[in-house]
Image (cartoon, grey):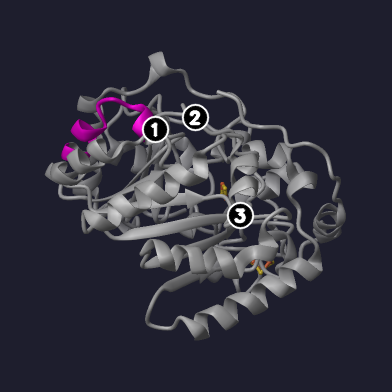
Amino acid sequence: MVKLDTLPAPLGLLAELTHRCPLGCPYCSNPLVLDKRDDELDANTWSRVFREASALGVLQVHLSGGEPAARRDLPEIVSGAREAGLYSNLITSAVGLTAQTLAVLAEAGLDHVQISVQDSDEASADHIAGYKGASVRKRALAAEVVKLGLPLTINMVVHRANIGRIEPMVEMALSLGARRVEIAHVQYYGWALKNRSALMPTREQVDEAVRQVEMLRARHHGKIVIDAVVPDYFARFPKPCVGGWGRRSLNVTPAGRVLPCHAAEVIPGLEFWNVRDHALAEIWRAAPAFSAFRGFDWMEEPCRSCARKEQDFGGCRCQAFLITGNARAADPVCHLSPHHDRVEQLAAARVDVAYSYRTA
Ligand code: SF4
Ligand code: FES
């Protein structure tokens, strides 16, 4: 058991302000059943949550969704983060966020903006987003972010349809004035899991993408930071998902449930507490869902006796459950997992079907 006085302090809070979103990206990791508008926390409650998070040691809040700009009270929410002393990062699709609102957010204390971009090819980008004209709006808003002097990160989710355009996508991020680009391979949760075989790249595409990233890092060294990791299903070892369960971060859903990671609700039997009923510190310390996979006692072999367990914490609990049916199992992405062959089969399963777009 992790002793309460040795509990790590969380560093980051993912605040899912709303599940509403104008786009329909088939790789969305939001749950298939979305929180309703009427259930969303109000701005005052978010401000209280931010103060509690700050007192707990959290340094950064990621204002996410859905599309956070779907909330009219976003400036008030940003002010709440600033007053709590948190560094605020707005994660936006840029659709539905006007230049005027962005300026108000900057005035309210917003520190950083991350815009998702679906592709460097406009028609493909709009097709992936399920929204005609999205690409043009994203470029326009990125220019406004830079004009306001806010640091900009471009986030690109890559999959079979766009993985061949890593180079133009990075060039595009550079031309937009981004300081950082995140090349994020699809993670198969929520809607992405539903679309897995339509999104899955080939091994050759993944290998080429890794080469491209190395080449681009060398070419643009000092001009832009390129974040990229080998995608889960093609890696030998799993990612240390969320920095270890209940170790580094908290995720608050639009309706106030506090999760150790954004996908945790897929694991049956976990009990999540709500910020409407409990203080954040109490949730971090004592909520059953946070205690469930903290430390190492819950682990089964091969993780239990593995030297890497303090590095990767056995990988992702949600993925372990989704693929093996057992949330305590090693993440089957790990080549030491007895279920690893299942990941290899899934990585080889590609079907060219129409996307199942995320619906509100
Ligand atoms: Fe990580 Fe478990 Fe694999 Fe070891 S066996 S590398 S701890 S997932
Ligand atoms: Fe839940 Fe990885 S997404 S632990």
Residue that carries the numbered disc 2 in the rendered image = 22
Q: CA distance from mark 2 to mark 3?
A: 20 Å
Q: CA distance from mark 1 to mark 2?
A: 8 Å
Q: What residue is at 48 percent from the left and 30 percent from the top? A: 21
Q: In the rendered structure, which amino acid carries the disc numbered 1?
A: Gly
Q: CA distance from mark 3 to mark 1?
A: 21 Å
Residue that carries the numbered disc 3 in the rendered image = 121
Callout 2: few (<14), some (14-19), or many (20+) C-alpha neighbours within 10 Å?
Answer: some
- Front-most of 198 and 84? 198
Q: Is residue 360 visible?
A: yes
Q: In the rendered structure, which amino acid carries the disc numbered 3?
A: Asp
Vertical placement of 170 versus 351: above or below?
below
Query: Percent position (x, y) of residue 95?
Result: 43, 37
Q: Is residue 353 left or right of residue 35?
A: right
Query: Percent position (x, y) of residue 122?
Result: 58, 49
- Front-most of 344 and 287? 344
Q: In the rendered structure, which amino acid carries the disc numbered 2?
A: Pro
Q: What residue is at 48 percent from the left and 56 percent from the top? A: 155
Label 3 secondary element? loop
Label 2 secondary element? loop
Callout 1: few (<14), some (14-19), or many (20+) C-alpha neighbours within 10 Å?
Answer: some
**Quadrant holding the C terminus:** top right
Residue that carries the numbered disc 1 in the rendered image = 96
Instruction: Judge whether residue 71 is colored magenta.
Output: yes
Query: Percent position (x, y) of residue 267?
Result: 62, 36
Q: What residue is at 55 percent from the left and 35 percent from the top? A: 30
Residue span colored magenta: 69-79
Q: What residue is at 47 percent from the left and 53 percent from the top? A: 1
Query: Percent position (x, y) of residue 228?
Result: 55, 68
